[in-house]
Amino acid sequence: MSSATFVALFIAALVIWFIVRVVDILLLVFIAILLAVYLSAVTDWLERRFKVARYAGLTIAVVATVAAVTLVGVRGGENYARASMDTFDEHHCFDVTLKMCYN
């Protein structure tokens, strides 16, 4: 192999190493971009549909989104917790007091 191939492989390895090291930050940036696009679209729709100011539309969009996410969490959280505990009990044979079951 030529030295140019080794240099290219070394640079590729450095790029992959860098991405692995900052993947958490890249994921946060990606989620922030998605949230910004979503809130901008909802704000634009509120501006066009109801003729509200941009700051008011953004406030309404944020409050409505937080309320919807909270409602989904409250309504679905109990079922999720119950299903998780059922799965935990079945797989690990623990009762409510976390004592080992002897069947």
Image (cartoon, rainbow, N blue to C red):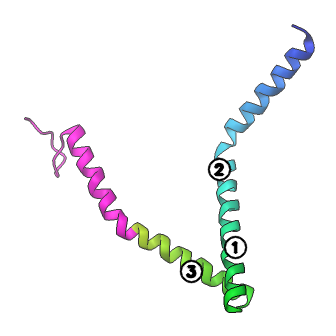
Q: What residue does disc 2 label?
A: 27
**Tags 2 and 3 in contact by the CB under 8 Å rule?**
no
Which type of secondary structure does the marked residue at label 2 adopt? helix
Where's the N terminus, which quadrant?
top right
Where's the C terminus, which quadrant?
top left
Q: What residue does disc 1 label?
A: 41
Q: Is residue 89 magenta?
A: yes
Which type of secondary structure does the marked residue at label 1 adopt? helix
Q: Is residue 81 magenta?
A: yes
Q: Earlier in the sequence, mark 2 or mark 3?
A: 2
Identified by mark 1, the residue type is Ala
Which image quadrant for residue 10? top right
Q: Earlier in the sequence, mark 3 or mark 1?
A: 1
Residue 18: where, in percent of width, then height?
Answer: 74, 36
Which type of secondary structure does the marked residue at label 3 adopt? helix
Q: Mark 3, mark 1: which one is toward the viewer? A: 1
Residue 70: where, in percent of width, then height?
Answer: 45, 72
Q: Residues within 10 Å of mark 3 (few under 14, many from 20)?
A: few
Indicate whether 91 appears above or below 53: above
Q: Which residues are magenta?
A: 74-103
- Residue at 74% x, 85% y is 54
Q: What residue does disc 3 label?
A: 63
**Tags 3 and 1 in contact by the CB under 8 Å rule?**
no
Identified by mark 2, the residue type is Leu
Q: In the displayed orientation, state which residue is furthest to the left.
A: 103
Indicate whether 100 appears above or below 3: below
Indicate whether 24 appears above or below 56: above
Residue 7: where, in percent of width, then height?
Answer: 88, 19
